[in-house]
Image: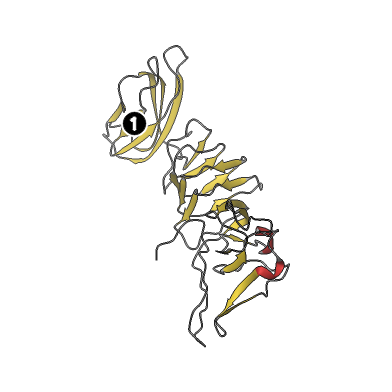
Amino acid sequence: MDQISGNVTVSFDVKGWKAVEGSINVTLGTETQNIDYTAIMENSFETKTIEFSNVAAGSTLKLETSAKRAFIDNVRIICGGTVSTSTTWDGENWSNGKPDLTKDAVLHAVPDASFSAKKLTVERDIVIPAGITITVENEVLNPNDVTFKFEHGAYLIQNNNAAINVGPAIFERKSTPIYRYETLMWSSPVIGQNIREISPNTLENRFTRYNEATNLWDANVTASDNFEAGEMIAFRSPNDFNISGDSQTFESEFYGTPINGTITVPVTKNSKGYNAIGNPYASPINL
């Protein structure tokens, strides 16, 4: 294809055999994109469109199945124009191929697998299931304040410390089974989370901050106090939990804009030098 170079759009019609057997790998030059489809033999063809950038003249186009059979028809190639750098998940397919750290992602439905994106925009109410990790190079945007919830065990990772997030997210957290007089130590992955609201049935004087100078936990959390980034708060389990018998799992949610960037927490050594520091991010951290 000596006459085709630069930004190239490839579209084609596809459907599977009696069942979908894999996906379609589309290679143009040195780049391969993997395209999912849902149509089968008894259905109409499904049209797919993908975009490539910086294609060298003389590149070869190849379409092949990742497993077994598929019908492909009406392959079309358009040269020139601006390549879209965004792809949208509709619950079954990505509109412009799978996202990566160089391609923006837009969520209109619950993803069925972990993925990476350059920027993430959420435009529908979505709950991210446990077991899924979303890795974003830059910012996370929820411009319309839709419900964007991560179940306990689902994680958000951001690479760019300078990225500024917009809009709220919800992060569910669960404890191991506990009894009434046991203490939890939590920190917040979001900006603006009120401390007492994470456990309304805990006695007010059982929310505490560690005091390095005295080596004690001070009950100085007020009704209006929010978590500071990286602040560790100790609090007793709810006062209606069992004292004996069956233990119970404590569950709560953090609501606010996800914390991102480098977080600095001052430490002191006036006494024994112990300091209480929490994880400020929406995923586990390496220590």
Q: Which kind of residue does numbered mark 1 sit on?
A: Val
Residue sitting at 46 percent across and 44 percent down?
Answer: 131
Against 33, residue 248 (above or below) is: below
Q: Nearer the viewer, residue 54 or 263?
A: 263
Counting from the top left corner in percent of width and height, residue 169 is at 60, 51
Rendered residue at 45%/11% (across/down): 42
Image coords of residue 104 (percent x, y): 48, 45
Residue 179, percent from left and from top? 59, 58
Left or right of 180 on screen, residue 39: left
User: What secondary structure is found at the residue carrying circle 1?
Assistant: strand
**Quadrant in which residue 122 is drawn:** top right
- Residue located at (59% from left, 47% from top): 149
Looking at the image, residue 97 lies above or below residue 48 = below
Q: Write the residue at 43% across / 26% down.
A: 37
Residue at the limit of the structure toward the right, as seen here: 223
Q: Counting other residues with Cα less than 10 Å from the Cα at mark 1, is it few (<14), some (14-19), or many (20 or more)?
A: some
